[in-house]
Image (tube, helix red, strand yellow):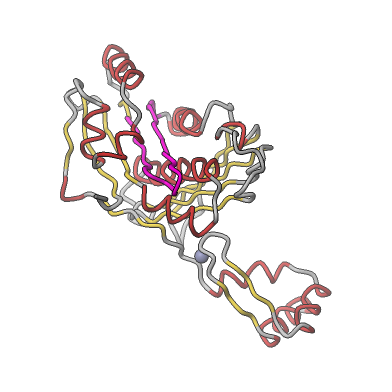
Amino acid sequence: MESPDRIIQGMALDGHFRVIAAQTTTAVETAREILDLAPVAAEALGRAMTGALLLARVLDKDLRKQYVTLRFEGNGPLGTVIADGTVAGNVRGFVANPAPQDPHLDVESAIGNGSLTVVRGTPPAGKPYTSQILLAGTGIATDLTRYLMRSEQIASAVLLGVLNRRDGVAAAGGMIIQAFPNTPEEAIHAIEKRVREAPSLSKLLETMPIEEAVATVLEGTGYKQIDAGHSVPVSYACQCTRERALAPLALLGEDELQEMIDEGGTEVVCQFCGRKYQFGEDELFTLTAKHDS
Ligand SMILES: [Zn+2]
């Protein structure tokens, strides 16, 4: 029996920790199908997508439309990995090379060394806030922990997991346990100890809903879910538009545009959702006219 993907919130150790958790199984399986992801690519992107959704909520400053984009640029076989998550629970992703040759790669070596850029903003107005860290090669969850500490001064533990089975993604999800500036050291040690000893979140999610999985991971810490009625549904969703699909073509040189016009038009495929946009001679001609002005 499958329960729908969602984000939940809770508190642990007498309110010393805020807990945000997400079940993203269906969203990650949808990404796997649309983007034709090999297991290691589904695992990397699934963790990144879950991380983007969780960060959007952790960093939420009452901005209903806030989004977070994670862009991993490593030298591993996956190439660039991008995940976009919004406070409203929409998530989408992209992997430059979704099917690396080596089937035994782990996520860390599949991404490789490089950088992680975190962008957060509120469309359409306002300049997005961007920061970058070097990938430590220890996994997406620890990269996000470092980002939260360095750029947002938030002490946290981040857990992310994707469980692949023969026929696709069996479970995916994650949680961020956030400490506050006045959280005592002993409480932090107690949570760290429990997280180290706890069973894997994605394995739990294969057999139980997110509410139970989080309660199991945080057993003995006085974890309580809050606002069950305010759980946020999660879905794989792309906000691409015809206008945005056309925009990159405006950056092409006149020769390239002329070639497309000679061919009677061109097709742009959204890299996140696979939607196809056809542009005819007239629209392309308008772009060449802009070059002249
Ligand atoms: Zn799209």
Q: Is residue 96 above or below residue 258?
A: above
Which residue, as the protein is rendered here, is positioned at the far right?
255
Residue 77 lies in quadrant: top right
Q: Is residue 1 left or right of residue 56?
A: left
The percent coordinates of residue 278 (x first, y second) are 61, 79
The percent coordinates of residue 36 (x first, y second) are 55, 55
Which quadrant would the C terminus be assigned to in this image? bottom right
Q: In this view, does 280 lie to the left or right of 174?
A: right
Q: Nearer the viewer, residue 176 or 197?
A: 197
Q: Residue at x 19, y 20 (%)?
A: 220
Q: What stretch is highlighted in magenta?
A: 154-177
Q: Is residue 225 above or below residue 286?
A: above
Q: In this view, does 160 lie to the left or right of 96?
A: left
172 in the magenta segment = yes
Which residue, as the protein is rendered here, is positioned at the far front?
166
6 in the magenta segment = no
The percent coordinates of residue 80 (x first, y second) are 62, 46
Q: Which residue is drawn at 55% across and 47% down?
A: 38
The percent coordinates of residue 69 (x first, y second) are 50, 48
Q: Main secondary structure of the magenta part?
A: strand
Q: Which residue is drawn at 24% across and 42% down?
A: 209
Q: Which residue is drawn at 68% across and 88% down?
A: 282
